[in-house]
């Protein structure tokens, strides 16, 4: 049986009050006769034909809105009910863009002060901003866009949030219900288009369902493995009157398992205690489980003394300065992290999903290890890599249980083996796989790694020379676009806390960083928010500079400008014979003038001697800044596990040229 | 599912990774029952999951099962390696409107039946032979003209296949099949004992 089936259904409890249930008979005749109710929206049609609000009652059976019957609040429009529900869900800010189908909602927004609206410049930016907001606060990010193109522009952000498990609720306008299916102006089949792009989606066809659906959407978005949820709102629903209902605490069919099975925890502890070469591999699930989960992970690492690596999405889950932390793993991970994964005998994976960027060639991935996998999503377990001990649980709850069981079990660890293992890891570490050489002669070209290293050092008050007021005391958040600069940021910027690193991991969305930084800055007005960008990526959502200007958001856009889509260029160099097909960033704008045009400050560093001054000026500026850092266009991101290669087949950088590993043709077919 | 065969390509010295680990394992058929909330779009979610993730659908049936039509049961016959079928189960279970998922094939003995309407057009000896075979299969004649029959036949998929094959030389003209409906044998239900 599936995990959901083994759980005690929580709706049993609510059957205790059958008196609150509505009779389910009225709507049932129409429905039961229509088999296609399950296929199309016929269930809805059936109910509306009857003109009675029985649909929600009968569909719900025993729980959700059963908490309270819709109050006959005749005064409120659908739009007002929507805002009230958002308010009850604790929503403080909405990222959006108006249009015909959502005008009634914008009208209601105009008449209230509880919820702030941030006007983006393109709907895609709104979703990324909501992602940045969500990732940096742990709250649900909220988006409001119009029908048709508003909704379709949001799709990339929705898939991005789906891949990276970011809680987002996206409200989309829709043409009035009687026009749906008629190819009306700005009509799109939003629920159809976003079905595989979301964790769940809703089309509200009855005013009676509106409040319940909003509450449910937030519940679905933030619980279990978080993700994006779309609510499609036809214009007549938000204009017409709607009843309000309070949020219910359970869902009729969706009940994620968060508590680990003690028997599985016991098996895991037995494996971990006996480990000679243990390794912990933690991902974004730990971040999603909240700062407490990250604290528990750090405590678990200290308690056990085991080495740990983080995925791209998991950076910050343990402090980067911790000696047990081996750096990021995977395609551009450190030598020590990847070889420890390859050589370990017990692997504990927490909130990570064995993504292909992490595993490399699957049939060579950590073959000698017995694997424990803690994840809230049962479909992530055994998806790519078979594991011996699956533990379905919230990462925090899983870690708490592991810690308790670890202390309760008197079995000592094999400290001699652990010492040997650490000695081996230190040998790998001594390789300094992230090493690069920066020519410090004035006039020298800037290495991109050096630019990030200086950005890190100067934002943390390390070795900064001149005094920089305020820096080091402010909370620092980093977002990135996608490409080489993203990997260099992941390698060279050190994250000490969770929720301070926002990047597009699963989908790899160029153009993510600038709007995400915007969302972070909205949530943390006093923080220092830096988008580490590439010159190609940043142009994909450059229009959001207008938003930064309008809301006086002092986001710093730190562009590593190598005049190439660097990662594409790198692959073309390594895998396609140096044929740089369409990867040159021709006709680039003058980023300094561009900043100026958007009422922001533009800065430029051409040579290594100018870098510190530019960073210093950028950090001191109280407005938005674009810092255009000209970096070495030929620099490649190393180490690298080429596609189709295993963890022990890394390519190291030019610093280690004697040990280069050849690339294979099989790797070419992989992305 | 079966598109990769390393033996076909002499260039490939070692198998390429994404295909290997799951695809070398043996395939099996699975009859999966899914209890879902009977809401708009739920079947599209299930079908979209199969097409989006590249799973097979050999047969699919769906209909409401509660007196008030609140829930539907979807029966899917699929095939894949053990790992793929486990994934299908987990992915189905992850859908918000899904109440229960059961792999009837793995969870014990079950009954699986489907119905077919089979039109045979012919005269003379072939027509008589078709009727004779239909009797052997306990197929019912639900429509007849001087030169045609429509047979109704219920049973396991194999039985329906066999009957249709036998009708082919006898003037098989058209077939309409329902797909598989399935239940566990004995007292077990998809809802277990607690719901």
Image (cartoon, coloured by chain):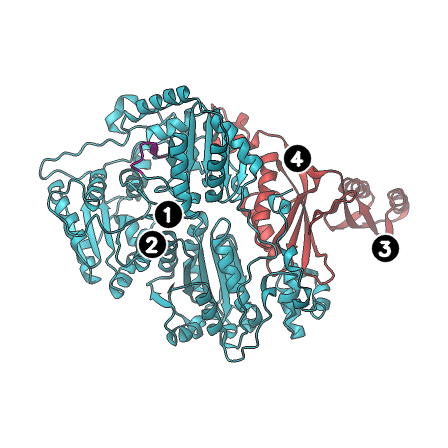
Mark 4 or 2, closer to the camera: 2
Q: Looking at the colours in the rendered structure, which chain would you say is drawn in cyan?
A: A
CA gap, disc 3 to disc 1?
A: 60 Å
Which quarter of the figure has residue A495?
A: top left
Left or right: A328 in relation to A213: left
Q: Find residue A520 and report its horizontal and vertical position in percent.
A: 32, 55
**SS of the residue at dot 2?**
helix
CA gap, disc 1 to disc 2?
A: 10 Å
**SS of the residue at dot 4?**
strand
- The numbered mark, 1 or 2, whose residue comes first in the sequence reads 1
**SS of the residue at dot 1?**
loop
Chain B on-screen colour: red
Q: Residues within 10 Å of mark 2 (few under 14, many from 20)?
A: many
Mark 3 or 2, closer to the camera: 2
Q: Which mark is residue A516?
A: 2
Magenta stretch in the rendered image: A320-328
Label 2 lies in what chain? A
Q: Is residue A452 above or below residue A306?
A: below
Label 3 lies in what chain? B
CA gap, disc 4 to disc 3?
A: 35 Å
Same chain for the residues at labels 4 and 1, yes or no? no
């Amino acid at each position: 049986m599936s995990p959901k089936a083994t759980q005690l259904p929580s709706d049993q409890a609510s059957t205790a009050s059958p008196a609150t249930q509505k009779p389910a008979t009225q709507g049932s005749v129409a429905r039961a006769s229509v088999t296609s109710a399950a296929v199309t929206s016929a269930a809805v049609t059936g109910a509306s034909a009857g003109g009675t609000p029985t649909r929600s009652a009968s569909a719900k059976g025993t729980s959700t809105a059963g908490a309270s019957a819709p109050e006959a609040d005749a005064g409120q429009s659908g739009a007002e009910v929507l805002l009230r529900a958002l308010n009850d869900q604790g929503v403080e800010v909405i990222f959006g863009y108006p249009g015909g189908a959502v005008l009634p909602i914008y009208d209601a927004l105009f008449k209230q002060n509880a919820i702030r609206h941030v006007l983006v410049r393109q709907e895609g930016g709104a979703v990324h901003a909501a992602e940045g907001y969500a990732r940096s606060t742990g709250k649900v990010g909220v988006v409001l866009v119009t029908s048709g193109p508003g909704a379709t522009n949001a799709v990339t952000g929705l898939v991005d949030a789906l891949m990276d498990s970011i809680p987002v609720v996206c409200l989309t306008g829709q043409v009035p219900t009687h026009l749906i299916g008629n190819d009306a102006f700005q009509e799109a089949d939003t629920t159809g288009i976003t079905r595989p792009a979301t964790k769940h989606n809703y089309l509200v066809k009855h005013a009676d369902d509106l409040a319940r659906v909003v509450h449910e959407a937030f519940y679905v978005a933030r619980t279990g493995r978080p993700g994006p949820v779309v609510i499609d709102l036809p214009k007549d629903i938000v204009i017409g009157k709607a009843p309000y209902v309070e949020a219910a605490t359970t869902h009729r069919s969706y009940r994620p398992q968060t508590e680990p099975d003690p028997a599985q925890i016991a098996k895991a502890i037995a494996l971990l205690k006996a480990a000679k070469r243990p390794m912990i591999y933690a991902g974004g699930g730990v971040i999603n489980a909240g700062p407490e989960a990250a604290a528990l992970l750090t405590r678990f690492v200290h308690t056990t003394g085991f080495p740990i690596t983080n995925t791209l999405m998991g950076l910050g889950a343990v402090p980067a300065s911790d000696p047990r932390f081996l750096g990021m793993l995977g395609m551009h991970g450190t030598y020590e992290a990847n070889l420890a994964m390859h050589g370990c005998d017990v692997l504990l994976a927490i909130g990570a999903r064995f993504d292909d960027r992490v595993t490399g060639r699957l049939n060579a991935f950590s073959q000698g290890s017995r694997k424990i996998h803690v994840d809230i999503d049962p479909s992530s377990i055994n998806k790519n890599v078979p594991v011996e001990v699956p533990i379905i649980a919230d990462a925090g709850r899983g870690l708490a249980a592991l810690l308790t069981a670890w202390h309760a079990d008197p079995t000592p660890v094999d400290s001699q083996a652990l010492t040997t293992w650490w000695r081996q890891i230190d040998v790998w570490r001594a390789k300094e796989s992230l090493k690069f050489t920066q020519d410090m002669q004035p006039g020298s070209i800037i290495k991109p790694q050096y630019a990030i290293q200086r950005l890190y050092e100067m934002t943390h008050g390390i070795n900064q020379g001149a005094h920089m007021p305020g820096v080091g005391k402010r909370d620092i958040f980093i977002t990135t676009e996608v490409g080489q600069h993203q990997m260099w940021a992941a390698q060279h910027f050190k994250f000490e806390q969770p929720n301070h690193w926002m990047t597009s991991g699963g989908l790899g969305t160029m153009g993510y960083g600038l709007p995400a930084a915007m969302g972070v800055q909205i949530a943390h007005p006093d923080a220092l928010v830096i988008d580490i960008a590439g010159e190609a990526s940043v142009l994909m959502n450059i229009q959001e500079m207008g938003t930064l200007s309008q809301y006086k958001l002092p986001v710093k856009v730190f562009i590593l400008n190598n005049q190439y889509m660097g990662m594409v260029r790198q692959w073309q160099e390594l895998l396609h014979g140096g044929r740089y097909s369409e990867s040159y960033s021709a006709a680039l704008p003058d980023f300094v003038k561009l900043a100026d045009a958007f009422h922001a400050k533009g800065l430029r560093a051409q040579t290594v001697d100018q870098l510190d001054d530019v960073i210093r000026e950028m950090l001191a500026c109280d407005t938005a800044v674009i810092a255009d850092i000209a970096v070495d266009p030929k620099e490649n991101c190393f180490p690298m596990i080429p596609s189709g290669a295993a963890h022990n087949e890394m390519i190291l950088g030019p610093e280690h040229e004697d040990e280069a590993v050849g690339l294979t043709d099989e790797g070419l077919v992989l992305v | 599912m079966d598109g990769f065969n390393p033996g076909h390509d002499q260039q490939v010295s070692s198998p390429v990774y994404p295909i290997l680990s799951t695809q070398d394992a043996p395939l099996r058929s699975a009859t999966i029952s899914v209890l879902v909330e009977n809401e708009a779009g739920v079947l599209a979610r299930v079908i979209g999951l199969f097409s989006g993730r590249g799973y097979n659908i050999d047969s699919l049936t769906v209909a409401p099962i509660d007196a008030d039509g609140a829930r539907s049961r979807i029966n899917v016959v699929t095939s894949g390696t053990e790992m793929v079928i486990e994934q299908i189960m987990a992915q189905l279970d992850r859908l918000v409107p899904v109440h229960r998922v059961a792999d009837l094939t793995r969870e014990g003995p079950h009954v699986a039946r489907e119905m077919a309407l089979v039109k045979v057009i012919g005269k003379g000896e072939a027509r008589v032979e078709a009727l004779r075979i239909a009797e052997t299969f306990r197929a019912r004649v639900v429509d007849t003209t001087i030169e045609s029959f429509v047979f109704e036949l219920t049973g396991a998929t194999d039985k329906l296949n066999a009957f249709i094959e036998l009708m082919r030389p006898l003037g098989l003209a058209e077939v309409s099949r329902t797909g598989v409906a399935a239940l566990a044998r004995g007292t077990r239900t998809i809802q277990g004992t607690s719901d």
